Image: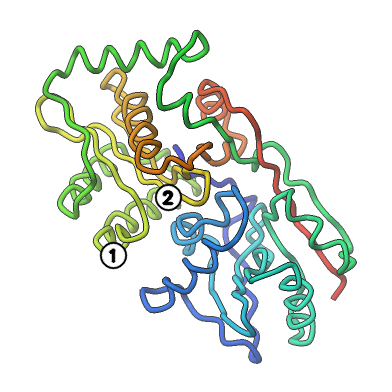
Amino acid sequence: MTLYRQPQTRPTADTATLPCLPFSDIDSRNMPRLAAYLAATDSRSCDYTLGGVILWADLFRYRICETEGMMLISGLMENDLSLPAFSLPLGPDENTLPRAVELLRDCGSPLRFSAIPEDRLHLFAATAPRSVQDLGRDWSDYIYPISALATLSGNRLKRKRNHVNRFFSDHPGRSFAAMTPADAAECRSLLHFLGHDGSFIGRAEFKAVDSFLWRWAEMSEYFHGRVLRDGSGRIVSFTVGEVKDDTLHVHIEKTDHSVTGAGETINKLFCEEMLETYSRLVYVNRQDDAGDPGLRAAKESWRPVMMLPKFNVTYIK
């Protein structure tokens, strides 16, 4: 699974409701503004991409407010859904955070910020937070060189390359193409066939992906979706990603693992196409493993070159 979060509890808190600030749900009317702010935010973290917000808006109860030239995102703590929190305020310069802290404090809001990338922690130094909590390995994003995933060259990825060759050999009539609205409906059928593990987070992920695919006609303006079909024309894998600066963010990847090599093939072909289309790409972010041993082993098998740690920052009210 690419989309995965492991909150400690089910959502029990309401996001910060501040009478002095007009927070609203994310919808088609305000999504372009949110997308613009996120695109201008210099971070490789998946939490600061449109897909990272949209897909998990229901679980984390994300709401947004544009005020005084910045965008605020309210929600819940990434590792504790019983506590309301904010994401890193989005704005034009390093003065955005101090202004946001002052504004939220004046409004009487609990001052908690969740999933802050390590390279943005310095912005908080001047605002004297009470505590900074490292969310640990479970929440760190896996980063890979896109050239390696696009070519699968060398001994380190030999097994992946062999699986791709096996898929090519077994399915001479295969196809790899952009996801259409009709394809999205078929992808939903594959998703329902694959199901989930019955856990709280498994159900939440299933719901997030299913809803996203149902809205694909609207979402396709912002994301790249691809489907892989076997020789009979059946979709055996699909993926959705987002390009931001030098990084391809893979938000969704679902595969029928009874088809040998399908997962490796869609990953390779997607990275290959995106690199050809966007020559500026250097990295692929395949998100965190949430402490799941199987998911961790799968992500490590692609040989990440770095991890992106995240932190919670809390203030005295």
Crowding at dot 2, Cα within 10 Å, few <14 / some 14-19 / many 20+, comes out as many
Count up the numbered dots: 2
Q: What residue do we see at 35% from left, 27% from top?
A: 263
Q: Are marks 2 and 1 in contact (CB under 8 Å)?
A: no
Mark 2 or 1: in front is: 2
Residue at the (34%, 57%) spot, across then down: 212
**272, 313: nearer the viewer:** 272
Q: Quadrant of the N terminus?
A: top left
Query: Up-down: is 64 above or below 291?
Result: below
The structure residue drawn at horizontal position 65% and vertical position 77%, both measured from the top left corner, is: 16
Q: Which mark is residue 242?
A: 2
Residue 7, given in percent of the width and then of the height, sits at 61, 50
Tell me the kind of residue under disc 1.
Glu
Mark sitting earlier along the chain (2/1): 1
Q: Which circle marks residue 168 in the picture?
A: none
- Between 64 and 211, the one lying in front of the other is 64
Residue 74, percent from left and from top: 61, 71
- Give the alpha-carbon distance from disc 2 to disc 1, as whole Å: 15 Å
Res. 260 image quadrant: top left
Looking at the rendered structure, the kind of residue marked 2 is: Glu
Where, by quadrant of the figure, is residue 277 drawn?
Answer: top left
Give the SS element for disc 1.
helix
Tell me the quarter of the picture where residue 211 sits. Answer: bottom left
Location of mark 1 (residue): 218
Q: Closer to the camera, 79 or 113?
A: 113
